Amino acid sequence: MEKGRIDLRLIEQVIDQDRKAQFQLFELTKGMVYSMAFRILNDEDTAHDVLQDTYVKVFQEIRNLKHPEALISWMKTITARKAIEKAKKRLRFEELSSAEDQVEDHFESWFDAELLDQAIRSLPSGSRAVFMLVAVEGYPHLEASRMLGISESTSKSQLNYAKKLLKTRIKTLLQA
Amino acid sequence: MKKLPDHVPRASAWEDLLKRGEFESQLTDHLPTLPRLSPRDTAWERITVELDRQKEVTIWIRWSAAAAVVAILLFSLVDLNSTNDHIQEQELTAERVPDTKTDFETTPSESITTAEIVELSTEDLSPAIAGGDKPERFVRVIEAPKMTLPEVVLSQSKSISLERPETQMQESVPPKTLHQVSISWNKIKPGLQVKTSFGRAEAELEPKQQASTGDLTPLKVDIYN
């Protein structure tokens, strides 16, 4: 886990703009940052842009970080904000009144993490962003809705919609 | 081969298994173990290039800000110097004239003009001020004409001349008339004659000055005892 290997000394070296320490921090956290950006955006090039912007901001503003132990969550927040900023024009929140009826709620299947990952990628952009922020990263609905520029109730309904869609997509993937 | 004893699971085992199979439970189990994706190998190079570019931009911004501050300071200094010169040019001589010399006496015997007062005051100045290194600057004194009231002389004679005041209001112009009445006591043309100007040219109808309005010569009344 990244948090265990990132000690205060490394953070101090990064604050001092030590390029080796910066590279070390990058190596320890690049998977976390890129995975999050890619799952929100579902686009490799844009995810790489977000990765670059995130690390540039981290290295420039890490001296302002008051609690070094919160470095990982701080980096996740930066990544989420950068990704949403990039995807703002592409995020679409589908109307749920008609779409929810088409999704069946019954689920009796076993799946693994890789199948879940594929199913997440197939979600619509809006519900996928809400699912990533709330279900995967653990942000409360209020904060996620503020990040996305939607209401809290929309965030909740989009999360339920994403879960119902995941059931359907996982079933489809299992049958394939 | 010995037969090992069978162990019976708890009665809730099946229910627990069903719970583990629920979608929400599987989701909770698998979300933290989602596969970790890796960026391209060139990602770090792009980041370092961007960091170096940002550093150059930051240095450029700092130098520009410093140059702007220096330029503003220089400009304000130059502006301040020019303003001081301008103020010195506008200095008044009243600053060099002591207030003690400005008490004018207005007695008729010692009527002194302003020019004389200024000359007197500059004579008392110290040489450092009056004839120092700096060029002297004077404000040109405007000599105002001395105003004197006409003397009133009371004559001992008993004759008093009365003059009509010049500020007398003009008498009202009589209305035009086409008739003229003249009265004379001549023996040749006795009686009352009535002339009429009815039908004459307009120029002839201009009002003639009458003795009562046009004659402003002073009347002199002599009183003899």
Image (spheres, coloured by chain):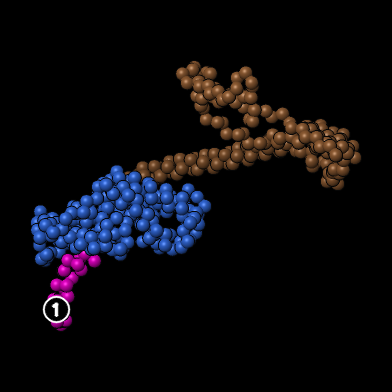
**Which of these two is toward me, A107 or B57?**
B57
**Which of these two is toward me, B29 or B168?**
B168
How many dots with numbers? 1
Q: Specify the quadrant that holds the N terminus of chain B.
A: bottom left
Which quadrant of the view contains residue B77?
A: top right
Judge whether B27 appears above or below A125 on screen. Answer: below
Which quadrant of the view contains residue B114?
A: top right
**Which of these two is toward me, B121 or B117?**
B117
**Left or right: where A133 falls relative to A102:** right
Mark 1: amino acid: Met
Judge whether B15 appears above or below A23 on screen. Answer: below
Near mark 1 (Cα within 10 A), the count class, few <14, some 14-19 or many ≥20, is few
Residue drawn at 11 percent across, 57 percent down:
A98
Q: Which residues are magenta?
A: B1-30
What colour has chain B?
brown
Q: In x, y percent, where is residue A9?
A: 49, 59
Residue drawn at 53 percent across, 23 percent down:
B194
Judge whether A22 appears above or below B142 on screen. Answer: below
Q: Write down the chain letter for disc 1.
A: B
What colour has chain A?
blue
Residue drawn at 55 percent across, 31 percent down:
B174
Q: Specify the quadrant that holds the C terminus of chain B.
A: top right
Q: In x, y percent, where is residue B13?
A: 16, 77
**Which of these two is toward me, A97 or B51?**
A97
Residue annotated with mark 1: B1
Q: In x, y percent, where is residue B55?
A: 49, 43
